Amino acid sequence: MDMEMLLRAVIFGVSTSGILFLVSLGLSIGFGLMRIVNMEQMIYYTFGAYATYSLLTLTGSFWLGLASGVLLAAFLGFLVEKMLLRRVYGQELMFTMVVTFSVFLIGIGIIQYVWGLVPKPVASPTEIMVNIFGVSMPLYRLVIIGIAAFVYLLIQLLLNRTIIGRALRAGIEDPDKVQGLGINIYRIITFTFVVASGLAGLGGALNAPLIMVGPYMGFDMLLYAFVTVILGGLGSIKGTLVSAIILGQVISVGGTVWAPLSYIAPFVVMFFVILIKPTGLFGVAGKAFGFEE
Amino acid sequence: MLVGALVVARFLFPAKMNFITEISIFTIYVMGCNVLYGYLGMVSFGQPFYLSIGAYSAAIYLAYLGNSPLVSIACGIGMGLIVGVVLGPFFVRLRGDYFALVNAAICAIGLFIFEKLLLPITRGDDGLWYRARMSETPLLDIRQPASFFFFVMIVLAVVLILFRSMDQSVLGISFRAVKTNERKMRFLGYSTFGIKWIGFTLASMLSGLAGSLYAVNLGFVNPYLGTPHRAAEVLVATLIGGAGTVYGPFFGSFAFIGIRDVVSKYITRWEFFVGVLTLIVLFRFGKGIWGNIDLLIRERFGKKRETARLGNVSCRTNQTESSEKLL
């Protein structure tokens, strides 16, 4: 394998990392704060991608589709949280997993009803190729990397510089004490959930031109997102970033070495890390809201 | 009850035979999931992997090594046992959420193994065909659908009887105790690790058996028997039927396959209905179909059964209380 191919694989890998990070960040924060394994997070991802497709065909503008995808996903997340998940906080993990999984199935059903079963292609907004170190790369990949990095910075700012972000971080450590300080933890949870589903929608919209948009796209992404989150440790933002970067490279470079590796390598990596360190790379041992260990 | 199910099944025999065969096989599969979810309280999103292990070991035996379907079914169970024993120690020490997702991961790995890695043996997506290689079996020729039906009935009856005795034995009670409060169980001096390992092995054996029955029934297998997408089916069936009960899986698979067949006749999108149904069952009838029937029976003819199952009842009430408190 020559250097050019390797470099291309690495840059592709970073853009894959960007999408993995966007999609799985919400899962990770959601677990840390609410101690819920959000199986249905990926339905927002799918909805984001489909909204992009619809608006792209209607108006011809990808970026408008992207914005609408994020908004639709955030709105759906808000609805689901308010109407359903509110009831399951503090219940045992298995119960919440099955509940959210059935929400996921319902979402897939709705998507099949609205958009049909046939996968839809989404055109990439730019076809421009950019030359980096003698390797020509599609500009769109770099845009993804840029957006993911920007989102990471925003999230860091949000968590470290604002009251609501600090309350959120404190909530991950000990929600009951946060409530004791007079902060409405339910509002924080709703806010987190909306942000998380919006990010998932953004990930879906960004990923839409790279893959075919189909009803089951969330299912495949669900596995990868969970691999990312588990590898990094549930509830850790730093862990999610690190493992997204690792997995992006594993997928991309692995796929260049031997094509089927791109599908299977993340699972193998996670498998061995979990067997050696059962809480993932940066797992947190915080106390969750209303949850007794 | 057991005989009742068989008689009813025979009653409807002529038209719906394949349907009943499928339900019965699915019941065994669901029972495997039930051991994990209903008894031990561990969710696994990777049950299709164990199913396809059973199916492929039966299929590979039939296609390359031998001709007897009975031996192939034994192969399926044996491979289930081996996989359970080998993977068990690594898996059961994981916390519930990690356990579920690592299982989903191994399911994806399994799909890859059967589809790509063992391509020369399993022929990948084309599937493995071996119906012509199956030889006649003594007493009951299970190559014929009609006699295969009886064979499955016998297997189901045996499995149900064994399962019921497991349910009432120390093993069944300790499974439930692990679900109710693992720490207390460990405090009492039981090795929860061992109990979980046994449960995990039992589940993978049952799935392997179901897989090999599928393989013999269909006459071919392909990797899509074990895609992670299908992990939901078995979980949903477990829940609908009533997790943690002996006969729950039968009702669950009956309801699930029935609904799937009926709904998909009218619309192709059964996921929506399955999702809604699961939510309704979870929030309104936490015990599932058989759980509620069982409760009714016990209220009606209470005393006799109560004394016989005293051990279980105390566990059950504990569970009921905690679930009521939560809801």
Image (tube, coloured by chain):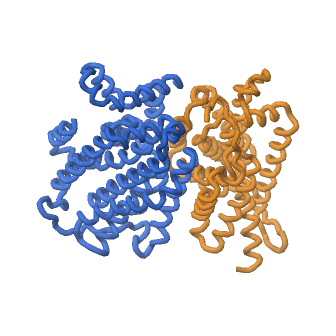
Quadrant in which residue A199 is drawn: top right
Q: Nearer the viewer, residue A200 or A161?
A: A161
Is A86 placed left or right of B259 in the picture?
Answer: right
Q: Which of B308 and A289 is in front in this view?
A: B308
Q: Residue at x 57, y 51 (%)?
A: A217
Image quarter (top left, top right, bottom left or bottom right) of the N terminus of chain B: top left
Q: Which residue lies furthest to the bottom in this view?
A: A2
**Residue B307 in picture, x, y percent from top left:** 28, 26
Q: Which residue is drawn at 21% across and 44% down?
A: B16
Tell me which chain appears blue.
B
Q: Which residue lies furthest to the front in this view?
A: B189
Quadrant in which residue B225 is drawn: bottom left
Is B221 placed left or right of A273 in the picture?
Answer: left
Please say if A141 is above or below A282: below
**Residue A87 in picture, x, y percent from top left:** 58, 26
Chain A hue?
orange
Report whether residue B270 is seen. no
